[in-house]
Image (spheres, helix red, strand yellow):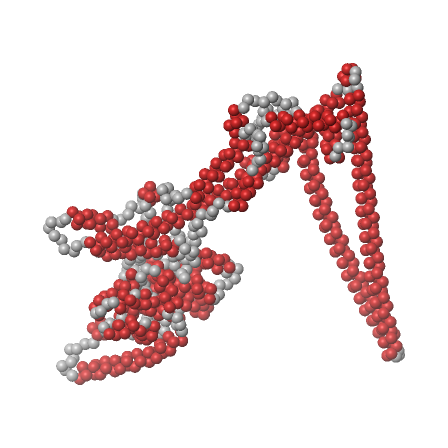
């Protein structure tokens, strides 16, 4: 049976190793993995399958059950006839199997039923067919023992004779011997308990000695103080000073001698205690030595007695005396059988232990290989899905290029095929077909994880471009998922800050620049906002946001009408703000109304609604309100969102200076063709790139913006131009340049590359330079506005005095 079990193990091992080494391209692909909903997918483990473990192979060889070359196993053993049974080893293991089960059950009373280990797989396993070599070994052993008995060599090893003596004296009490294991276990537990109590007693004795020493010192101090007091009160009158000093010295010497005497007494007591302990140990050793001598003497007597009995049996020649003395060799034969049975059981347990250890080792190795194989399949599936996205994107672009805009009456078959392919490409994918989802993954969903619509519903051409862009984004994210993501770094950092307050540091700044994972963005945005508005929140009354909201609901202000008009125009392509009943509309209204009461100078400005809408995607109403306060009152300069948009105009001039410095070729190109790119970038700064870049890049920009401030806007604005600098330089007329600038940011999909440009290629980027340029251009813009105001007043006065110009009106009057 052991042979066949090992053969099965070996075949399984070879098969699984061949599985690991073979190519699995022809196998069915695994089910699609559930990608993380965050910007950065979870870290994929190492995708490579580990090579065959040499240490595991070596351990397998060590744990293998040995078989002699002369043994007949497998088919050879099956084809041989059953050999003659020997009386020495023809026995049943049923009794021992039952006793082993009982002993294991008693040792594992608290364990589960399925964890109990039984040696043999059946209730009754009789070793009825031993191998010829086993028979020869058994017979040789018996002959050898008889020869030793005839030679009267009674000096066998003490250990063997003790075992034979026990078997002789108690041949019918084997169950008691097997149950002695439980008694030994109980004795060992009691000994451990006794030792622990002895250690505790020693500790208590040490504590008692230290307490006694402390009491002794305190008593000495009390006696000294009482003596000094008495001496000072009664004996100091009329005594010379020198005599007093001499008395003090004598007292000190007496105290010192007393202390030394007490220490010596303590040392004497400890030495006496050690002597007592040593005497006790000597007595114990003498007792043990006496017991051992008595045991040896008893064993010698047993040996001599057995030797005499064997001699009598050999010397006896009469049949009658042989019949009388026959029980003794019979008893010896039983003892030998008992010993053989015990040895066989021991060998069986060793074989079983080796086999089980080898089985555990193999199963662990196979499990690790299976996990590695699963990771490889997962990586291969992800790679194939990314490649499929790329191919389908190119396929859509090819269809768009081949589509002819002019319809002819005689449509060719190729035209019909292309039209059908376009319809199939733009058709919505079925959502409730799990059996098809196994074979084809759901590549592009209707909305992304932020709620933005991925494919527009109006123009077919725009649909095709949007779907191609969405496929490129999916392919890019899947490719990034195969690499080591920042998710692990974020998990480690947040775990390190669980028991301490999060602080600004270089490590956190680098993590935020690489992008906050989707699952941690709410927490981190809230922390960033609280970091910037802490002084405002500390000075505000409790429930400040609710107070402002209640005031706005009870008494509408002039900004309420414009807020209502802009609610549905905020983010119409986001499902959270697409209809009056959407979840985000009411929250957006509440935050804008509360802010209009907090800051009546601004009230409401177009652009604030988009800032709040993005904040509400990850924050609650009150946190989104404080996020708006952070942007308007902390980050941006004054008059950034007022009627004149003075701060926004200043930033556009600062951006022009930075563009001429960081990207001189592109700036000269714009100047050559007189392209005013600030018409495009003005909205970038006003709403922090909302509706200007794809959503993945937008939220990574906002991550850094909420942590570092407005300097991030300048960085990413310049990075967008640098990303497409070569493409813009190829355009040679102002119309094509301006047309390209209107949509080129939506074609930038690689957030990692854009981030590397913004925070790497554009360095150095000092904030002091931006502040100085803002101050410089602010004065210039104010002068220009003053001149414009003077011209306006002159115009109004001239209109009042001149009859011909009374019909002329200004832009402000026309708006009103």
Q: Is residue 51 above or below residue 623?
A: above
Q: Nearer the viewer, residue 21 or 270?
A: 21
Q: Nearer the viewer, residue 429 or 477?
A: 477
Is residue 565 visible to the viewer in this orientation of the structure?
A: no
Q: Residue at x 41, y 47 (%)?
A: 376
Residue 129 location, quadrant: top right
Q: Quadrant of residue 115?
A: top right
Q: How many marks?
A: 0
Q: Does residue 478 appear left or right of residue 96 in this picture?
A: left
Q: Is residue 226 left or right of residue 707?
A: right
Quarter of the image that includes the C terminus: bottom left
Q: Residue at x 37, y 75 (%)?
A: 770
The x and y percentages for residue 405 are: 16, 56
Which image quarter holds the N terminus?
Answer: top right
The picture places residue 783, in percent across and down from the top left corner, at 30, 81
Residue 382 higher or lower than 643, as above or below: above
Q: Of all residues shown, which one is farthest toward the left? A: 409
**Residue 493, percent from left and from top:** 48, 60
Q: Is residue 107 above or below residue 83?
A: below
Between 166 and 182, the one lying in front of the other is 166
């Amino acid at each position: 049976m052991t042979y066949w079990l090992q053969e099965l193990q070996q075949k399984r091992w070879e098969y699984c190793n061949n599985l690991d080494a073979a190519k699995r391209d022809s196998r069915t692909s695994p089910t699609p993995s559930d990608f993380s909903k965050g910007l950065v997918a979870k870290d994929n483990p190492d995708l490579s399958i580990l090579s065959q473990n040499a240490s595991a192979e070596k351990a397998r060889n060590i744990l293998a059950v040995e078989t002699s070359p002369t043994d007949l196993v497998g088919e050879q053993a099956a084809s041989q006839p059953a050999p003659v049974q020997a009386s020495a080893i023809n026995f049943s293991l049923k009794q021992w199997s039952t006793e082993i089960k009982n002993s294991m059950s008693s040792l594992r009373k608290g364990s589960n039923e399925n964890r109990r280990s039984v040696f043999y797989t059946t209730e009754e396993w009789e070793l009825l067919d031993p191998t010829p070599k086993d028979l020869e070994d058994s017979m040789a052993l018996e002959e050898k023992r008889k020869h030793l008995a005839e030679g009267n060599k009674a000096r066998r090893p003490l250990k063997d004779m003790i075992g034979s003596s026990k078997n002789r004296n108690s041949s019918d009490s084997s169950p008691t011997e097997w149950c002695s294991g439980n008694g030994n276990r109980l004795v060992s537990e009691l000994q451990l308990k006794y030792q622990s109590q002895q250690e505790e007693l020693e500790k208590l004795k040490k504590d008692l000695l230290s307490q006694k020493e402390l009491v002794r010192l305190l008593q000495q101090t009390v006696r000294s103080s009482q003596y000094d007091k008495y001496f000072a009160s009664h004996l100091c009158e009329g005594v010379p000073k020198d005599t007093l000093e001499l008395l003090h010295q004598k007292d000190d010497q007496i105290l010192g001698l007393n202390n030394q005497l007490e220490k010596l007494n303590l040392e004497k007591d400890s030495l006496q205690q050690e002597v007592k302990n040593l005497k006790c140990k000597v007595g114990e050793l003498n007792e043990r030595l006496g017991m051992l001598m008595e045991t040896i003497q008893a064993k010698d007597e047993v040996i001599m007695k057995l030797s005499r009995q064997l001699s009598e049996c050999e010397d006896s020649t009469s049949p009658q005396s042989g019949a009388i003395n026959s029980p003794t060799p019979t008893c010896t034969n039983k003892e030998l059988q008992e010993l053989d049975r015990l040895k066989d059981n021991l060998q069986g347990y060793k074989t079983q232990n080796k086999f089980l250890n080898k089985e555990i080792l193999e199963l662990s190795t196979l499990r690790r290989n299976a996990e590695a194989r699963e990771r490889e399949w997962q990586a291969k599936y992800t790679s194939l899905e990314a490649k499929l996205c790329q191919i389908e994107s190119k396929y859509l672009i090819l269809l768009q290029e081949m589509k002819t805009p002019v319809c002819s009456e005689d449509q060719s078959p190729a035209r019909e095929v292309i039209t059908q392919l376009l319809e199939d490409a733009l058709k919505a994918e079925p959502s409730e077909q799990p059996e098809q989802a196994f074979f084809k993954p759901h590549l592009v969903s209707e909305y992304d994880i932020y709620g933005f619509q991925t494919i527009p519903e109006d123009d077919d051409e725009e649909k095709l471009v949007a779907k191609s862009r969405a496929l490129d984004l999916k392919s890019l994210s899947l490719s990034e998922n195969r690499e080591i993501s920042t998710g692990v770094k974020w998990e480690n950092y947040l775990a390190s800050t669980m028991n301490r307050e999060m602080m600004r540091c270089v490590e956190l700044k680098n993590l935020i620049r690489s992008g906050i994972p989707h699952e941690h963005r709410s927490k981190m945005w809230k922390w960033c906002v609280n970091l910037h508005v802490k002084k405002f929140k500390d000075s505000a009354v409790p429930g400040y946001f609710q107070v402002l909201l209640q005031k706005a609901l009870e008494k509408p202000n002039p900004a309420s009408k414009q807020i209502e008009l802009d609610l549905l125009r905020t983010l119409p392509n986001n499902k959270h703000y697409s209809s009056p009943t959407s979840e985000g509309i009411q929250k957006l209204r509440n935050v804008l109304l509360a802010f209009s009461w907090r800051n009546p100078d601004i009230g409401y400005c177009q652009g604030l609604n988009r800032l709040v809408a993005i904040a509400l995607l990850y924050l609650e109403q009150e946190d989104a309100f404080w996020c708006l306060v952070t942007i308007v009152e902390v980050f941006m300069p004054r008059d950034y969102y007022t009627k004149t948009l003075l701060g926004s105009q200043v930033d556009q001039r600062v951006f022009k200076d930075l563009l001429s410095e960081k990207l001189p070729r592109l700036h000269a190109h714009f100047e050559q063709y007189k392209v005013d790119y600030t018409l495009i970038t003005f909205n970038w700064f006003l709403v922090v790139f909302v509706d200007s870049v794809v959503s993945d890049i937008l939220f990574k920009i906002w991550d850094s913006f909420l942590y570092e401030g407005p300097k991030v806007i300048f960085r990413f604005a310049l990075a967008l131009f640098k990303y497409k600098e070569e493409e813009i330089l190829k355009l040679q007329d102002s119309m094509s340049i301006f047309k390209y600038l209107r949509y080129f940011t939506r074609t930038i999909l690689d957030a990692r590359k854009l981030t590397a440009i913004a925070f790497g290629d554009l360095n150095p980027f000092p904030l002091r330079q931006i502040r100085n340029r803002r101050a410089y251009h602010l004065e210039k813009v104010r002068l220009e506005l003053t001149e414009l105001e003077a011209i306006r007043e002159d115009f109004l006065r001239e209109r009042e005095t001149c009859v011909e110009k009374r019909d002329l009106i200004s832009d402000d009057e026309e708006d009103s």
